[in-house]
Amino acid sequence: MNWKKDLREKDDAVSPVIALMLILAILATCLAVYTTTYVPGLKQQDEITHSGEVKLAFERFASDIDNVIALGKPAVYTEVLELGGGDVPLSPTKSSGTIEIEEIKIGTYQIGTETPLDLDGVQITYTPSFTAWEKQGYLYKNGVVWITKDEKRTPSALKWYTVDDGLKQENKTIETWYSPTVSDSVLIIPQFFIGDNSEITGSTNVKLRVNATITDQNLYPTSTNVKLTTANGTVITHNDINKIRWLNIEVSVE
């Protein structure tokens, strides 16, 4: 009967191997179900959350610019945002994005009878790539944050329902920026510049930085008229100005 004993011993030796193979097969099946069924939804949800965080960062940046101009004095603001999202357990690959700062013309200024010179502004765009969700980006321009997708855009603020509402708010913001209260014949004029870095692509955290400084320009002769003309044709005239206080607003990404 030794052959029966040997057979039982062989069966006992094989059983753990079969059990281990069954466990591995179950784990592999569970992992496959998780990665094919749950991971796409989890990545999309994380992308949606990330997109909302980018939107909030842009809105905070818009407030930073408004605060700098309202204060009319040196200040530094920094907003942090993440370029990519969608990293979830068992799928750590993140999407990426590009943030870019561009110079735009928002009007002209004229001192007395001198030749009009440009007033520059900035626009900032965030464009996602390799995302598991919609390729929804954002644009900051003239105080307004826009939601973008391809060539389409709409204001991010719920109080502005249409593109026309957003454009009207842009014009209103520019007029507010260049209609400051004149104190002791000193006129404060904001002027935007782009810093050393104007574009970054990746999936890591970046900082949008606003650095405002002051430069005084005495006018000769004194009591000179200064005319500001916005891009939409609105003319703002300040009379009897002795000094222009340039509010130099440098915007960069790092």
Image (tube, helix red, strand yellow):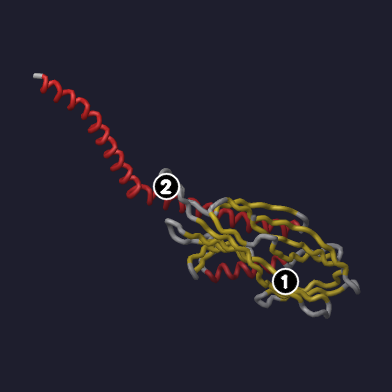
87 to the left or right of 251: left
Q: Dot 2 corresponds to which residue?
A: 91
Q: Quadrant of the N terminus?
A: top left
Q: Which residue is labeled 1 in the image? A: 119
Q: What number is the disc on residue 97?
A: none
**143 or 130, which is in the foreground?**
130
Across and down, in percent, residue 129 comes to 48, 60
Q: Residue at x 77, y 78 (%)?
A: 116
Farthest left residue? 1
Which residue shows up at 64% across the image and 57% down it?
253
Q: Quick one: label 2, few (<14), some, or many (20+) residues within 10 Å? A: few
Horizontal relation, residue 22 to residue 235: left or right: left
SS for callout 2? loop
Q: Is residue 93 above or below residue 116?
A: above
Residue at x 33% of width, y 43% of height? 31
Q: What percent of the width, then of the height, locates residue 29? A: 28, 43
The picture places residue 58, in percent across and down from the top left corner, at: 59, 57
Instruction: State the residue in front, 227 or 245.
Output: 245
Name the kind of residue labelled 1 in the image.
Leu
Q: Earlier in the sequence, mark 1 or mark 2?
A: 2
**Quadrant location of residue 60?**
bottom right
Viewed as shown, does residue 80 lie left or right of 180? left
Between 148 and 111, the one nearer to me in the picture: 148
Mark 1 to mark 2 CA distance (whole Å): 47 Å
